[in-house]
Amino acid sequence: MELGLAVPQFGRFAALSSVLRVAAEAESMGLAGLWAGDRLMTPLRPKDRYPGGDGRIPEAHRVSLDPFAVLSVAASATTTVRLGTSALNACWYPPAILARSLTTIDHLSGGRLVAGLGLGWSSDEYAAAGVPWQGRAARYDATLDVLEAIWGTDPVAYENELWTIAPSHIEPKPARRPPLYLAGFARPALRRVGRRGDGWLTATLPIPMLTAMWDIVRRGAEEAGRDPAALRMAMRANPVVTGAGDPPWSGTVAQICDYLATAAEAGVHEIILDLQHTATSDEHLLDLAGDFRSRLTTSGAA
């Protein structure tokens, strides 16, 4: 199992100095990836429950930097670490513009992009972005179609009731087609991962639930004539490090690492460790990341 880190982006870590320092030191530490999320706002009276913990939107999400911008900065401070999105709310963006933004990061980083996309969970954010909440699954599938077309060979052409791309040259192309990781937990979303994705973006879940969902992904791949063994599972973990708690959501580093090691045995290929909800400074975040890496390496999980 590989260990990645959420790039500084939220709360007290929404600063250029944090992005530059943490990105460079994470690469020096030997971490596999730097990953950016996608938040737009924190409604005072949200219509939808936040999918995790007690259902409340994390305090750190009240301040949020643009994922494309922070990954561009991270690319400038690193040379080898992968740069991923976990996950972009794909429907917020016209797909031709989404393709341009992702391709730019891939082009400027020398082919290090992992494109992680999801549907999102907040109808309030959809309304603010001017995108209909209804019909989002069909919009998402069409977005994937456009990305595949643009990342293929020129001339590119696409037309449906949402977008029209006249036959065109759209360049540059990515250094290689970026791996496409898809998020989701409902059965249709999991089957879509197997049918269309290179990997599944998940979150910390009870291990039996995780493996049951992974089985759906793998069956979806088999039914589509794809090799399920080629798929990767990347788990985002947002722990709060405390003296004791309820792993994997809170607890000591050792307790959380025990869960992550079990997740590795269950098939997780990469952990995306988001420490912005528990660290108090850049130095603290990096110290915690080093502690997680050391313990997981010692246990044989990483």
Image: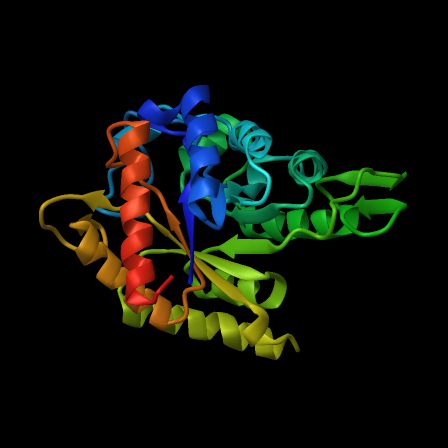
The colouring scheme, among rainbow, by chain, secondary structure or one colour, is: rainbow
Position of residue 1 relative to residue 59, above or below, is below
Name which quarter of the figure residue 124 lies in.
top left
Position of residue 227 relative to residue 78, above or below, is below
Position of residue 185 relative to residue 237, above or below, is below
Q: In the image, is 153 to the left or to the right of 120? A: right
Q: Quadrant of the N terminus?
A: bottom left
Question: Going by the picture, which residue comes out furthest to the left?
Answer: 244
Looking at this view, is 143 or 245 the one in front? 245
Taking the spot 57% from the left edge, 42% from the top edge, the residue there is 90
Taking the spot 68% from the left edge, 45% from the top edge, the residue there is 111
Query: Does residue 54 appear anywhere in the picture?
Result: no
Looking at this view, is 43 or 173 the one in front? 173
Residue 206 in the image, given as x and y percentages of width and height: 26, 64
Looking at this view, is 100 or 13 the one in front? 13
Position of residue 140 relative to residue 108, above or below, is below
Residue 3 in the image, given as x and y percentages of width and height: 41, 53
Q: Quadrant of the C terminus?
A: bottom left
Taking the spot 20% from the left edge, 50% from the top edge, the residue there is 253
